[in-house]
Image (cartoon, grey):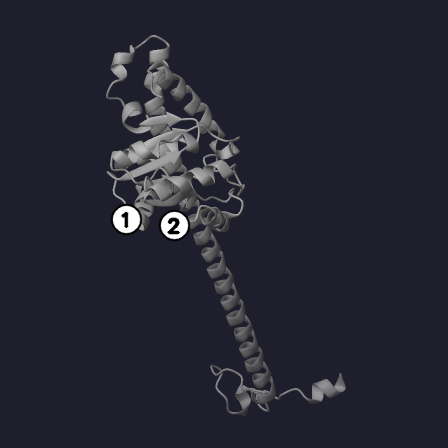
Amino acid sequence: MKEFMEKQVPISNQAEGGSGSEAPVITNAPTPTTENPVANFVDLQLIEELTETNEELVEEQIDVGADQLTKEQSVSEQRIKDTSHQLTTVREHISEIAVILPICRAKAGEWDNSKLEGNAIKLELQPNAWVENICAVDFERLAEMGRRHVLLDVDNTLCLRNDTAVAASAVDYLKAMREQGAIEQLTLISNIGVWTRGGVARIRQIAEMLDTPHYVCACWPNIKPKPKPFQQAMSLIGGTPESTVIVGDQIFSDIRGGNRLGLYTILVDPLGPDHPITFWKRRRQERILKHLERRGVT
């Protein structure tokens, strides 16, 4: 306490010459300490480190956000493609239903058969001829009509689905027709999908078996009955709609596509069972064929 009192600062009073209005003056006051440069350096270094860390975090967040946007954009584009594919399928189904509906009504007695004249069933789904198999096609008569270019479906027309074995009778018959000049050029035309075993290599093997270098493998979205595969096939063999015949077992692909372009269409009975993808179409085809039988289309 004594040491503390000795360090107290003396205050001059009024008797020592000071005026009463003046504030007391403290002498021997400690001077302010200067700033510590080491501390300042540490603070600046810390600030720089925090700034760098924040910048890295911001860049990382930007990268994560950009990746997320890219993924979302990719998903959105795929959804758009899937939706477009579904809409196309729905439109095709609606078109097929519009063709089949009058047949169902006629069968139920709501319409008579005369009102089916001029309907799409006659224009697109009705073949020019209907035979049992490829060997029953009269290519000589077709040649007399000026139709010597032949398009052949593969699955269930020439061979079983996913198989490469063409019946020897069919191979010999087609060879004989070509030697006689009834068939000038021959090409295969087949839809190829993810469910098709062997793909293009399988179709090429069958074409070699028939001694023809020509074949068309139609892939989505340009598959039968769309015009492009038929046009490609005719281009390969130099055919025109007026000189070309299409032989197949599917009304909704082979016959419909051929009729749209003005080809001579020949329907054959399927050699075996269908793939589940085309099974539902076969059931519809059977109903249409029963109607055609009643009308005497053979």
Q: Quadrant of the N terminus?
A: bottom right
Q: Position of residue 224 (x, y in %)?
A: 37, 39
Q: Residues within 10 Å of mark 2 (few under 14, many from 20)?
A: some
Q: How many marks?
A: 2
- The disc labelled 2 sits on which kind of residue? His
Residue 204 image point, x, y percent: 46, 50
Q: Residues within 10 Å of mark 1 (few under 14, many from 20)?
A: few
Task: Give me the C-alpha separation between circle 1 and circle 2.
Answer: 11 Å
Q: Earlier in the sequence, mark 1 or mark 2?
A: 2
Look at label 1 and name its amino acid: Gly
Instruction: Name which quarter of the figure residue 35 lies in.
Output: bottom right
Q: Secondary structure at mark 1?
A: loop
Residue 115 sits in which quadrant? top left
Of 122 and 63, nearer the camera is 122
Q: Is residue 59 visible?
A: yes
Instruction: From the viewer's perspective, tell me whether residue 2 is left or right of residue 224.
Output: right
Q: Residue at x 50, y 82 (%)?
A: 23
Q: Which mark is residue 214?
A: 2
Q: Which residue is mark 1?
A: 238
| Front residue of this view, candidates 15 and 267 | 267
Residue drawn at 50 percent across, 40 percent down? 166
Considering the numbered disc 2 on the image, is that residue within a helix, a strand or a loop?
A: loop
User: Where does the C terminus fall, quadrant-wise?
Assistant: top left
Residue 107's disc is none
Q: Please tell me which residue is depicted at 35% across the width and 31% down the height of the picture.
A: 138
Using the image as rendered, state which of residue 219 and residue 270 is in the foreground.
270
Q: Tell me residue 40's x, y (percent).
A: 56, 84
Q: Please state which of residues 243 and 195 is positioned toward the viewer in this rendering.
A: 243
- Left or right: 74 in relation to 32: left
Visible residue check, residue 264: no
Q: Residue furthest right?
A: 1
* Looking at the image, residue 183 lies above or below residue 283: below
